[in-house]
Image: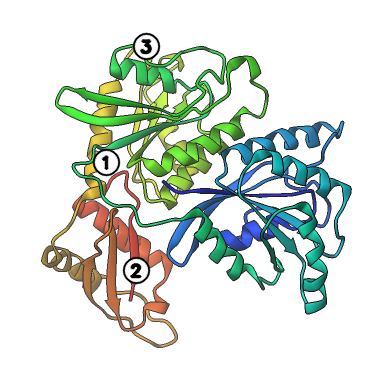
Amino acid sequence: MSKVVAIVGRPNVGKSTLFNRFIGERRAIVDDVSGVTRDRHYGVAEWIGKEFVIVDTGGYVANSSDFFEAEIRKQVDFAIQEADLLLFMVDVVVGITDEDEDFARVLRRSKKHVLVVANKVDNFDQATEASVFYRFGFEEMFTLSSVNGSGTGELLDRVIEVLNIDEEKPEENPLPKFAILGRPNVGKSTLLNVLVGEERNIVSPVPGTTRDTIHTHYNKFGKEFLLIDTAGLRKKGKVTDDIEFYSVMRAIKAMEEADVMILVVDAVEGMEAQDTNIFVLAAKRRKGIVILVNKWDLIAKDNKTMETYLKTIHEKIAPFTDVPVIFVSALDKTRIFKAVDVAMEVYENRRKRIPTHELNEFLLKVIENYPPPSVKGKFIKIKYVTQLHSNTPAFALFCNHPQYIRESYTRYLENKLREQFNFQGVPIAMFFR
Protein backbone atom coordinates (compact mmCIF):
# COMPACT_ATOMS: atom_id res chain seq x y z
CA MET A 1 0.00 0.00 0.00
CA SER A 2 1.37 3.43 -0.93
CA LYS A 3 2.31 5.87 1.80
CA VAL A 4 0.86 9.37 2.22
CA VAL A 5 2.99 12.52 2.58
CA ALA A 6 1.36 15.83 3.56
CA ILE A 7 2.87 19.27 2.93
CA VAL A 8 1.87 21.51 5.84
CA GLY A 9 2.67 24.97 7.16
CA ARG A 10 1.33 28.50 7.52
CA PRO A 11 -0.08 30.37 4.48
CA ASN A 12 2.10 31.58 1.61
CA VAL A 13 5.30 29.62 2.21
CA GLY A 14 5.22 27.80 -1.16
CA LYS A 15 3.41 24.54 -0.36
CA SER A 16 1.42 24.43 -3.61
CA THR A 17 4.50 25.21 -5.71
CA LEU A 18 6.33 22.26 -4.15
CA PHE A 19 3.25 20.04 -4.62
CA ASN A 20 3.13 20.93 -8.33
CA ARG A 21 6.83 20.16 -8.69
CA PHE A 22 6.44 16.77 -6.97
CA ILE A 23 3.57 15.60 -9.20
CA GLY A 24 5.03 17.17 -12.34
CA GLU A 25 2.04 19.27 -13.33
CA ARG A 26 0.45 22.60 -12.43
CA ARG A 27 -2.66 21.45 -10.60
CA ALA A 28 -2.68 23.56 -7.42
CA ILE A 29 -3.31 27.30 -7.88
CA VAL A 30 -0.23 29.30 -6.96
CA ASP A 31 -0.39 32.99 -5.95
CA ASP A 32 1.45 35.40 -3.68
CA VAL A 33 -1.78 36.11 -1.78
CA SER A 34 -2.10 33.96 1.34
CA GLY A 35 -5.07 31.63 1.68
CA VAL A 36 -5.35 30.67 -2.01
CA THR A 37 -5.39 26.92 -1.29
CA ARG A 38 -8.68 26.15 0.41
CA ASP A 39 -9.48 22.79 -1.15
CA ARG A 40 -6.98 20.02 -0.64
CA HIS A 41 -5.10 18.66 -3.63
CA TYR A 42 -3.74 15.15 -3.84
CA GLY A 43 -1.70 13.32 -6.44
CA VAL A 44 0.94 10.68 -7.02
CA ALA A 45 4.65 11.56 -6.86
CA GLU A 46 7.38 9.30 -8.22
CA TRP A 47 11.08 9.29 -7.36
CA ILE A 48 13.71 6.67 -8.30
CA GLY A 49 10.95 4.29 -9.34
CA LYS A 50 9.11 4.56 -6.00
CA GLU A 51 5.68 6.18 -5.71
CA PHE A 52 3.78 7.84 -2.87
CA VAL A 53 0.63 9.93 -2.48
CA ILE A 54 1.29 13.62 -1.86
CA VAL A 55 -1.29 15.97 -0.28
CA ASP A 56 -1.20 19.77 -0.49
CA THR A 57 -2.96 21.42 2.46
CA GLY A 58 -4.18 24.95 3.08
CA GLY A 59 -2.24 27.42 5.21
CA TYR A 60 -2.64 26.74 8.94
CA VAL A 61 -3.67 29.77 11.03
CA ALA A 62 -4.20 29.04 14.73
CA ASN A 63 -7.03 30.66 16.73
CA SER A 64 -8.47 32.53 13.73
CA SER A 65 -12.14 33.53 13.72
CA ASP A 66 -12.24 33.58 9.90
CA PHE A 67 -14.62 30.86 8.68
CA PHE A 68 -12.40 29.61 5.84
CA GLU A 69 -9.25 29.59 7.99
CA ALA A 70 -11.08 27.63 10.69
CA GLU A 71 -12.23 25.02 8.12
CA ILE A 72 -8.72 24.80 6.66
CA ARG A 73 -7.33 24.27 10.16
CA LYS A 74 -9.66 21.30 10.73
CA GLN A 75 -8.69 19.72 7.44
CA VAL A 76 -4.97 20.20 8.08
CA ASP A 77 -5.51 18.38 11.39
CA PHE A 78 -7.08 15.49 9.43
CA ALA A 79 -4.13 15.42 7.03
CA ILE A 80 -1.73 15.22 9.99
CA GLN A 81 -3.66 12.25 11.40
CA GLU A 82 -3.70 10.32 8.11
CA ALA A 83 -0.21 11.07 6.76
CA ASP A 84 2.78 8.77 7.20
CA LEU A 85 5.21 11.69 6.86
CA LEU A 86 4.82 15.47 7.27
CA LEU A 87 6.81 18.11 5.38
CA PHE A 88 6.71 21.25 7.56
CA MET A 89 7.35 24.11 5.14
CA VAL A 90 8.75 27.47 6.27
CA ASP A 91 10.00 30.62 4.52
CA VAL A 92 13.69 31.48 4.99
CA VAL A 93 13.17 35.04 3.73
CA VAL A 94 10.56 35.84 6.40
CA GLY A 95 12.17 33.71 9.11
CA ILE A 96 10.34 32.27 12.12
CA THR A 97 6.91 33.77 12.77
CA ASP A 98 4.47 33.30 15.65
CA GLU A 99 2.32 31.20 13.32
CA ASP A 100 5.29 28.91 12.62
CA GLU A 101 5.89 28.51 16.36
CA ASP A 102 2.23 27.69 17.00
CA PHE A 103 2.14 25.13 14.20
CA ALA A 104 5.41 23.52 15.31
CA ARG A 105 3.79 22.82 18.68
CA VAL A 106 0.85 21.15 16.89
CA LEU A 107 3.24 18.94 14.93
CA ARG A 108 5.26 17.96 18.00
CA ARG A 109 2.08 16.82 19.72
CA SER A 110 1.17 14.66 16.69
CA LYS A 111 4.20 12.37 17.31
CA LYS A 112 4.51 11.97 13.50
CA HIS A 113 7.80 11.98 11.60
CA VAL A 114 8.41 15.59 10.51
CA LEU A 115 10.93 16.98 8.03
CA VAL A 116 11.38 20.75 8.18
CA VAL A 117 11.57 22.22 4.66
CA ALA A 118 13.07 25.71 4.46
CA ASN A 119 11.84 27.21 1.19
CA LYS A 120 13.10 30.12 -0.96
CA VAL A 121 16.77 29.28 -0.37
CA ASP A 122 18.55 30.55 -3.49
CA ASN A 123 22.12 31.10 -2.26
CA PHE A 124 24.66 30.02 0.37
CA ASP A 125 23.89 32.89 2.77
CA GLN A 126 20.19 31.95 2.86
CA ALA A 127 21.13 28.31 3.47
CA THR A 128 23.14 29.43 6.49
CA GLU A 129 20.26 31.58 7.78
CA ALA A 130 17.96 28.55 7.58
CA SER A 131 19.72 26.97 10.58
CA VAL A 132 17.45 29.10 12.79
CA PHE A 133 14.61 26.64 12.07
CA TYR A 134 16.31 23.95 14.16
CA ARG A 135 14.80 25.90 17.04
CA PHE A 136 11.52 24.04 16.41
CA GLY A 137 13.09 20.92 17.90
CA PHE A 138 12.87 18.66 14.85
CA GLU A 139 15.99 16.70 14.00
CA GLU A 140 16.00 17.00 10.20
CA MET A 141 15.85 20.07 7.97
CA PHE A 142 16.21 20.51 4.21
CA THR A 143 16.76 23.72 2.26
CA LEU A 144 15.34 24.17 -1.22
CA SER A 145 13.70 26.48 -3.70
CA SER A 146 10.34 25.11 -4.81
CA VAL A 147 10.27 27.61 -7.70
CA ASN A 148 13.46 26.49 -9.45
CA GLY A 149 13.68 22.99 -7.95
CA SER A 150 17.11 23.23 -6.32
CA GLY A 151 17.40 20.97 -3.28
CA THR A 152 14.27 18.92 -4.02
CA GLY A 153 16.30 15.83 -5.00
CA GLU A 154 17.90 15.56 -1.55
CA LEU A 155 14.48 15.99 0.09
CA LEU A 156 12.89 13.29 -2.09
CA ASP A 157 15.76 10.89 -1.36
CA ARG A 158 15.05 11.27 2.36
CA VAL A 159 11.26 10.99 1.86
CA ILE A 160 11.69 7.63 0.10
CA GLU A 161 14.10 6.49 2.84
CA VAL A 162 11.73 7.46 5.68
CA LEU A 163 8.69 5.88 4.00
CA ASN A 164 10.69 2.68 3.45
CA ILE A 165 8.91 1.95 0.18
CA ASP A 166 9.94 -1.49 -0.97
CA GLU A 167 8.75 -3.67 -3.78
CA GLU A 168 5.74 -5.59 -2.50
CA LYS A 169 6.21 -9.35 -2.44
CA PRO A 170 3.44 -11.16 -4.30
CA GLU A 171 1.03 -12.99 -2.04
CA GLU A 172 0.56 -16.72 -2.34
CA ASN A 173 -2.84 -17.40 -3.89
CA PRO A 174 -4.00 -13.80 -3.43
CA LEU A 175 -7.71 -13.04 -3.37
CA PRO A 176 -9.01 -10.25 -5.62
CA LYS A 177 -9.51 -7.04 -3.64
CA PHE A 178 -12.41 -4.74 -4.55
CA ALA A 179 -12.57 -1.29 -2.95
CA ILE A 180 -15.99 0.38 -2.70
CA LEU A 181 -15.44 4.13 -3.12
CA GLY A 182 -17.69 7.14 -3.40
CA ARG A 183 -18.85 10.33 -1.76
CA PRO A 184 -20.66 10.24 1.60
CA ASN A 185 -24.17 8.80 1.63
CA VAL A 186 -24.22 7.31 -1.88
CA GLY A 187 -25.02 3.82 -0.55
CA LYS A 188 -21.63 2.15 -0.17
CA SER A 189 -22.42 0.39 3.11
CA THR A 190 -25.89 -0.64 1.89
CA LEU A 191 -24.25 -2.21 -1.14
CA LEU A 192 -21.81 -4.16 1.03
CA ASN A 193 -24.59 -5.37 3.37
CA VAL A 194 -26.65 -6.61 0.41
CA LEU A 195 -23.69 -8.47 -1.07
CA VAL A 196 -22.68 -10.27 2.12
CA GLY A 197 -26.28 -10.81 3.25
CA GLU A 198 -25.92 -9.34 6.72
CA GLU A 199 -25.76 -6.02 8.51
CA ARG A 200 -21.97 -5.84 8.28
CA ASN A 201 -21.93 -2.01 8.43
CA ILE A 202 -24.16 0.51 10.19
CA VAL A 203 -26.37 2.19 7.58
CA SER A 204 -27.74 5.67 8.17
CA PRO A 205 -29.04 8.50 5.96
CA VAL A 206 -26.62 10.76 7.84
CA PRO A 207 -23.32 11.02 5.93
CA GLY A 208 -20.37 10.07 8.09
CA THR A 209 -21.65 6.88 9.71
CA THR A 210 -18.82 4.63 8.56
CA ARG A 211 -15.65 5.49 10.44
CA ASP A 212 -12.94 3.08 9.34
CA THR A 213 -11.94 0.98 6.37
CA ILE A 214 -13.63 -2.43 6.71
CA HIS A 215 -12.50 -5.66 5.00
CA THR A 216 -15.13 -8.32 4.31
CA HIS A 217 -14.44 -11.80 2.92
CA TYR A 218 -16.95 -12.70 0.19
CA ASN A 219 -17.30 -16.37 -0.76
CA LYS A 220 -20.61 -17.11 -2.48
CA PHE A 221 -21.93 -18.42 -5.80
CA GLY A 222 -18.50 -19.65 -6.84
CA LYS A 223 -16.82 -16.27 -6.36
CA GLU A 224 -14.32 -15.37 -3.65
CA PHE A 225 -12.75 -11.96 -3.01
CA LEU A 226 -12.19 -9.28 -0.38
CA LEU A 227 -14.55 -6.29 -0.25
CA ILE A 228 -13.15 -3.06 1.18
CA ASP A 229 -15.67 -0.46 2.35
CA THR A 230 -13.74 2.80 2.36
CA ALA A 231 -16.05 5.49 3.68
CA GLY A 232 -13.50 6.41 6.34
CA LEU A 233 -15.64 9.17 7.83
CA ARG A 234 -16.03 10.37 11.38
CA LYS A 235 -18.78 9.37 13.78
CA LYS A 236 -22.08 10.94 12.76
CA GLY A 237 -22.24 13.08 15.91
CA LYS A 238 -19.14 14.93 14.72
CA VAL A 239 -19.92 15.31 11.04
CA THR A 240 -19.36 18.79 9.56
CA ASP A 241 -18.83 20.21 6.09
CA ASP A 242 -15.26 18.90 5.89
CA ILE A 243 -16.11 15.18 5.95
CA GLU A 244 -15.45 14.81 2.25
CA PHE A 245 -11.76 15.63 2.64
CA TYR A 246 -11.43 13.05 5.43
CA SER A 247 -13.20 10.57 3.13
CA VAL A 248 -10.70 11.25 0.34
CA MET A 249 -7.72 10.68 2.64
CA ARG A 250 -9.00 7.25 3.69
CA ALA A 251 -10.17 6.36 0.18
CA ILE A 252 -6.73 7.05 -1.30
CA LYS A 253 -5.10 4.66 1.16
CA ALA A 254 -7.69 1.93 0.53
CA MET A 255 -7.46 2.36 -3.24
CA GLU A 256 -3.77 1.51 -3.13
CA GLU A 257 -4.59 -1.88 -1.63
CA ALA A 258 -7.30 -2.75 -4.17
CA ASP A 259 -7.14 -4.44 -7.56
CA VAL A 260 -10.49 -3.05 -8.72
CA MET A 261 -12.19 0.16 -7.63
CA ILE A 262 -15.99 0.07 -7.53
CA LEU A 263 -16.97 3.74 -7.73
CA VAL A 264 -20.49 4.30 -6.40
CA VAL A 265 -22.23 7.39 -7.83
CA ASP A 266 -25.52 8.83 -6.58
CA ALA A 267 -27.96 8.73 -9.52
CA VAL A 268 -29.89 11.73 -8.18
CA GLU A 269 -26.86 13.97 -7.66
CA GLY A 270 -24.87 12.71 -10.63
CA MET A 271 -21.11 12.29 -11.02
CA GLU A 272 -19.53 15.23 -9.22
CA ALA A 273 -15.99 16.66 -9.09
CA GLN A 274 -14.83 14.44 -6.22
CA ASP A 275 -16.03 11.30 -8.04
CA THR A 276 -14.06 12.39 -11.11
CA ASN A 277 -10.95 13.15 -9.03
CA ILE A 278 -10.99 9.67 -7.48
CA PHE A 279 -11.59 8.12 -10.93
CA VAL A 280 -8.60 9.96 -12.42
CA LEU A 281 -6.35 8.97 -9.51
CA ALA A 282 -7.39 5.30 -9.83
CA ALA A 283 -6.69 5.42 -13.58
CA LYS A 284 -3.24 6.89 -12.94
CA ARG A 285 -2.58 4.12 -10.43
CA ARG A 286 -3.74 1.67 -13.13
CA LYS A 287 -6.47 0.10 -11.01
CA GLY A 288 -9.40 -1.72 -12.54
CA ILE A 289 -12.52 0.47 -12.46
CA VAL A 290 -16.26 -0.24 -12.38
CA ILE A 291 -18.82 2.57 -12.00
CA LEU A 292 -22.10 1.82 -10.22
CA VAL A 293 -24.86 4.41 -10.56
CA ASN A 294 -26.83 3.72 -7.37
CA LYS A 295 -30.39 4.77 -6.43
CA TRP A 296 -31.48 4.29 -10.04
CA ASP A 297 -34.95 3.47 -8.71
CA LEU A 298 -35.35 7.15 -7.71
CA ILE A 299 -34.89 8.47 -11.26
CA ALA A 300 -37.84 9.23 -13.53
CA LYS A 301 -37.07 7.41 -16.77
CA ASP A 302 -37.94 7.32 -20.43
CA ASN A 303 -36.42 5.28 -23.27
CA LYS A 304 -33.37 7.60 -23.50
CA THR A 305 -32.63 8.27 -19.83
CA MET A 306 -29.91 5.64 -19.46
CA GLU A 307 -28.25 6.59 -22.76
CA THR A 308 -28.18 10.30 -21.81
CA TYR A 309 -26.81 9.53 -18.34
CA LEU A 310 -24.09 7.30 -19.79
CA LYS A 311 -23.05 10.00 -22.26
CA THR A 312 -22.68 12.52 -19.42
CA ILE A 313 -20.46 10.14 -17.44
CA HIS A 314 -18.27 9.45 -20.47
CA GLU A 315 -17.78 13.18 -21.00
CA LYS A 316 -16.57 13.55 -17.41
CA ILE A 317 -14.16 10.60 -17.43
CA ALA A 318 -12.76 11.11 -20.96
CA PRO A 319 -10.44 10.08 -22.51
CA PHE A 320 -10.56 6.77 -20.60
CA THR A 321 -14.14 5.77 -21.35
CA ASP A 322 -13.79 1.99 -21.79
CA VAL A 323 -15.23 1.48 -18.32
CA PRO A 324 -18.31 -0.59 -17.40
CA VAL A 325 -21.16 1.53 -16.02
CA ILE A 326 -23.97 -0.37 -14.27
CA PHE A 327 -27.22 1.20 -13.10
CA VAL A 328 -28.20 -0.36 -9.77
CA SER A 329 -30.34 0.02 -6.69
CA ALA A 330 -28.64 -1.35 -3.57
CA LEU A 331 -31.87 -0.95 -1.63
CA ASP A 332 -33.95 -2.98 -4.12
CA LYS A 333 -31.00 -5.30 -4.95
CA THR A 334 -31.40 -4.46 -8.64
CA ARG A 335 -28.41 -5.61 -10.76
CA ILE A 336 -26.20 -5.85 -7.65
CA PHE A 337 -24.88 -9.31 -8.46
CA LYS A 338 -24.28 -8.31 -12.08
CA ALA A 339 -21.92 -5.70 -10.62
CA VAL A 340 -19.97 -8.52 -8.92
CA ASP A 341 -19.71 -10.45 -12.20
CA VAL A 342 -18.44 -7.36 -14.02
CA ALA A 343 -15.91 -6.55 -11.26
CA MET A 344 -14.53 -10.10 -11.57
CA GLU A 345 -14.25 -9.68 -15.36
CA VAL A 346 -12.35 -6.41 -14.90
CA TYR A 347 -10.03 -8.13 -12.41
CA GLU A 348 -9.27 -10.83 -14.98
CA ASN A 349 -8.77 -8.19 -17.70
CA ARG A 350 -6.21 -6.49 -15.48
CA ARG A 351 -4.23 -9.75 -15.19
CA LYS A 352 -4.54 -10.66 -18.86
CA ARG A 353 -1.41 -11.49 -20.85
CA ILE A 354 -1.34 -11.59 -24.65
CA PRO A 355 1.16 -13.98 -26.31
CA THR A 356 3.86 -12.00 -28.11
CA HIS A 357 3.30 -13.67 -31.50
CA GLU A 358 -0.45 -12.97 -31.31
CA LEU A 359 0.19 -9.36 -30.27
CA ASN A 360 2.58 -8.71 -33.16
CA GLU A 361 0.43 -10.49 -35.70
CA PHE A 362 -2.50 -8.21 -34.87
CA LEU A 363 -0.90 -4.87 -34.03
CA LEU A 364 1.73 -4.75 -36.77
CA LYS A 365 -1.02 -5.26 -39.33
CA VAL A 366 -2.97 -2.37 -37.75
CA ILE A 367 0.16 -0.19 -37.92
CA GLU A 368 0.80 -1.17 -41.54
CA ASN A 369 -2.74 -0.13 -42.50
CA TYR A 370 -2.45 3.19 -40.66
CA PRO A 371 1.21 4.07 -39.93
CA PRO A 372 2.17 6.90 -37.56
CA PRO A 373 2.34 10.30 -39.31
CA SER A 374 5.80 11.54 -40.25
CA VAL A 375 7.32 14.34 -38.19
CA LYS A 376 9.92 16.80 -39.54
CA GLY A 377 10.34 14.61 -42.61
CA LYS A 378 11.13 11.52 -40.54
CA PHE A 379 9.11 8.34 -41.11
CA ILE A 380 8.41 6.27 -38.01
CA LYS A 381 8.62 2.50 -38.27
CA ILE A 382 7.31 0.32 -35.43
CA LYS A 383 8.95 -3.09 -35.77
CA TYR A 384 8.11 -5.12 -32.66
CA VAL A 385 5.59 -5.19 -29.78
CA THR A 386 5.68 -7.06 -26.49
CA GLN A 387 3.72 -7.02 -23.25
CA LEU A 388 5.83 -6.10 -20.26
CA HIS A 389 6.02 -8.25 -17.14
CA SER A 390 4.00 -6.07 -14.77
CA ASN A 391 0.96 -6.40 -12.54
CA THR A 392 -1.17 -4.39 -14.98
CA PRO A 393 -1.37 -4.29 -18.79
CA ALA A 394 1.68 -2.45 -20.20
CA PHE A 395 3.12 -2.74 -23.69
CA ALA A 396 6.48 -1.80 -25.20
CA LEU A 397 6.61 -0.85 -28.89
CA PHE A 398 10.07 -0.67 -30.47
CA CYS A 399 10.57 1.90 -33.22
CA ASN A 400 13.20 4.13 -34.83
CA HIS A 401 11.96 7.55 -33.56
CA PRO A 402 9.99 7.02 -30.32
CA GLN A 403 10.17 10.72 -29.41
CA TYR A 404 7.98 11.61 -32.41
CA ILE A 405 5.01 9.37 -31.55
CA ARG A 406 2.02 11.63 -30.90
CA GLU A 407 -0.51 11.09 -28.13
CA SER A 408 -3.36 10.81 -30.64
CA TYR A 409 -1.61 7.88 -32.33
CA THR A 410 -0.94 6.19 -29.00
CA ARG A 411 -4.66 6.53 -28.25
CA TYR A 412 -5.49 4.99 -31.63
CA LEU A 413 -3.33 1.92 -30.96
CA GLU A 414 -4.75 1.59 -27.44
CA ASN A 415 -8.31 1.60 -28.80
CA LYS A 416 -7.41 -1.11 -31.32
CA LEU A 417 -5.92 -3.24 -28.53
CA ARG A 418 -9.09 -2.80 -26.49
CA GLU A 419 -11.32 -3.79 -29.43
CA GLN A 420 -9.33 -6.95 -30.13
CA PHE A 421 -8.43 -8.24 -26.67
CA ASN A 422 -11.04 -6.73 -24.28
CA PHE A 423 -9.34 -4.65 -21.62
CA GLN A 424 -12.59 -3.07 -20.45
CA GLY A 425 -12.26 -1.26 -17.13
CA VAL A 426 -8.47 -1.40 -17.13
CA PRO A 427 -6.03 1.45 -17.90
CA ILE A 428 -3.33 0.48 -20.42
CA ALA A 429 0.24 1.82 -20.43
CA MET A 430 2.11 2.05 -23.73
CA PHE A 431 5.86 2.77 -23.99
CA PHE A 432 7.70 3.55 -27.20
CA ARG A 433 11.37 2.58 -27.21
* Picture quadrant of residue 39: top right
Residue 36 point in image, percent of width and height: 77, 48
User: Which of 334/100 is in front?
Assistant: 100
Q: CA distance from mark 1 to mark 2?
A: 22 Å
Q: Which mark is residue 431?
A: 2
Packing grade of label 1 (10 A; few <14, some 14-19, many >=20) is many
Packing grade of label 3 (10 A; few <14, some 14-19, many >=20) is few
Q: Residue at x 82, y 57 (%)?
A: 32
Marked residue nearer the N-terminal end (3 or 1)? 3
Q: CA distance from mark 3 to mark 1?
A: 27 Å
Label 3's element? loop
Which residue is disc 3 drawn over? Answer: 199
Q: Which amino acid type is marked by label 2?
A: Phe
Q: Taking 78 as reference, is 192 above or below it?
A: above
Label 1's element? helix
* Picture quadrant of residue 127: bottom right
Q: Which amino acid type is marked by label 3?
A: Glu
Q: Taking 297 as reference, is 55 above or below it?
A: below
Marked residue nearer the N-terminal end (1 or 2)? 1
Can residue 319 be seen at all in this image of the molecule? Answer: no
User: Which of 318/234 is in front?
Assistant: 234
User: Which of 231/125 is in front?
Assistant: 125
Q: Which amino acid type is marked by label 1?
A: Val
Q: Taking 165 as reference, is 197 above or below it?
A: above
Q: Taking 316 as reference, is 14 above or below it?
A: below
User: Which of 257/328 is in front?
Assistant: 257
Q: Residue at x 86, y 34 (%)?
A: 64
